[in-house]
Image (spheres, rainbow, N blue to C red):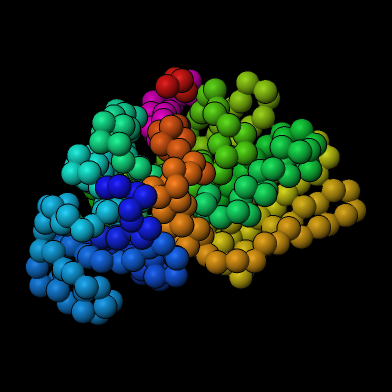
Amino acid sequence: MNAQDKPTLRWGLLSTARINRALIPAIRQSKRSQLLAVASRDRARADSYAREWDIPRAHGSYQALLDDPEVDVLYIPLPNSMHAEWTVRAAQAGKHVLCEKPLALSTAECDRIIAAAEQAGVVVAEAVMYLYHPLLRLVRQQVHNGAVGQVQLVRGSFSFPLEQPANVRWRPDLGGGSLWDVGSYPVSFIRWIAGEPQEVFGWQILSDSGVDESFVGLLRYESGTLGSFNCSFRQSVRTRVEISGTEGRLVCTQPFRIDETSTFHLFRGEQEEEIALPGPDAYVYEVEALAAAVLDGAELPVPLSGSRANVAVIETLYRSAREGLPQKIHPA
Ligand SMILES: NC(=O)c1ccc[n+]([C@@H]2O[C@H](COP(=O)([O-])OP(=O)(O)OC[C@H]3O[C@@H](n4cnc5c(N)ncnc54)[C@H](OP(=O)(O)O)[C@@H]3O)[C@@H](O)[C@H]2O)c1
């Protein structure tokens, strides 16, 4: 596609996933995006979904969407085990891609995605939407400017009770598990603030279906900074991060899906300051960042190398949990 000739990106949704509900309004709010098509494995489901959401085109297979010459960018919200295959296929078909988190289930898969994107000259980005919100850049900037002194510990939690037994998150063959799902957020947050760890350690509790229903993990940095997180499908709802330093701490509630209930507070001695930044939700920023990357060549807040690094940490945490030993992170 010649970006100069085309000021608007035409989006196609690869499947009728539940999370589309967050992306559809964001694409519609975004100034340089337009929702053109949806595909489903099932023709009738694609048709009724297109009617329900007022989407102009419906395709009865994923390949048909890849073959649609008028679609510029695909949103891929498939089960985790299908991310790599369909992102590579989409890139090879010349489509830009916004792929749901986690980008893939191994660094080897990430490498295939990176190679396919480079070869096709297309933009591929992971939809780790909260990191597209400017508030996250502000938090990182404040921490790096010394707001809490020297960072000693970055902690994060993301849990919720996953009731439906048929949910794809319970399926080992589809890349289920609490760490791949909600745990990927606190892991990315710790890395967002502290960079790449040297070593990790993890413990998991397995479900009857064989995925981790709960996971706790530790990250150790050369600088002496530590990271810790927990995630679960069996605990009540909790999303929170805290950055503790030698001079203060920054506490964020509801950081992973920023909305009016999210709070960001900086504590230093007796002082408490609220960091606030109103604006659209993170999904709109995510869609606009993808449009800016494709149409203007702008840098993405999370490059593919960062998504690969997140997968490397998660992969190593799982190995640690299986073997019961801390594991070194191997640099890319
Ligand atoms: N960024 C966020 O805020 C956020 C939030 C939730 C989820 N996610 C991510 O989005 C992805 C989808 O999550 P979701 O909860 O929306 O999933 P979901 O509702 O279960 O949807 C997955 C879709 O994949 C398609 N599919 C293809 N093969 C399938 C199979 N063997 N089994 C089940 N579905 C299959 C189905 O669409 P068709 O039948 O139409 O083909 C299905 O609707 C995951 O990667 C998850 O990590 C991100």
Is residue 315 inside the magenta stretch? yes
Quadrant in which ligand 1 is drawn: bottom left
Is residue 144 inside the magenta stretch? no
Q: Which residues are magenta?
A: 310-328
Determine whether, in the image, residue 22 is placed left or right of residue 199.
left
Residue at 76% x, 38% y is: 145
Residue 55: x and y in percent read 25, 73
Residue 84: x and y in percent read 26, 40
Nearest the camera: 286 or 210? 286
- Classify 193 as above or below 74: above
Residue at 81% x, 51% y is: 267
Q: Residue furthest right?
A: 270
- Classify 44 as above or below 90: below
Residue at 62% x, 47% y is: 137
Q: Is residue 238 visible?
A: no
Q: Is residue 38 visible?
A: yes
Look at the magenta stretch and give its main secondary structure. helix
Determine whether, in the image, residue 88 is placed left or right of residue 227.
left
Q: Residue furthest front?
A: 5
Residue 131: x and y in percent read 53, 49
Residue at 47% x, 62% y is: 284
Residue 293: x and y in percent read 43, 46
Q: Quadrant of residue 264?
A: bottom right
Nearest the camera: 282 or 188? 282
Q: How many marks do you count on the picture? A: 0
Nearest the camera: 131 or 148? 131
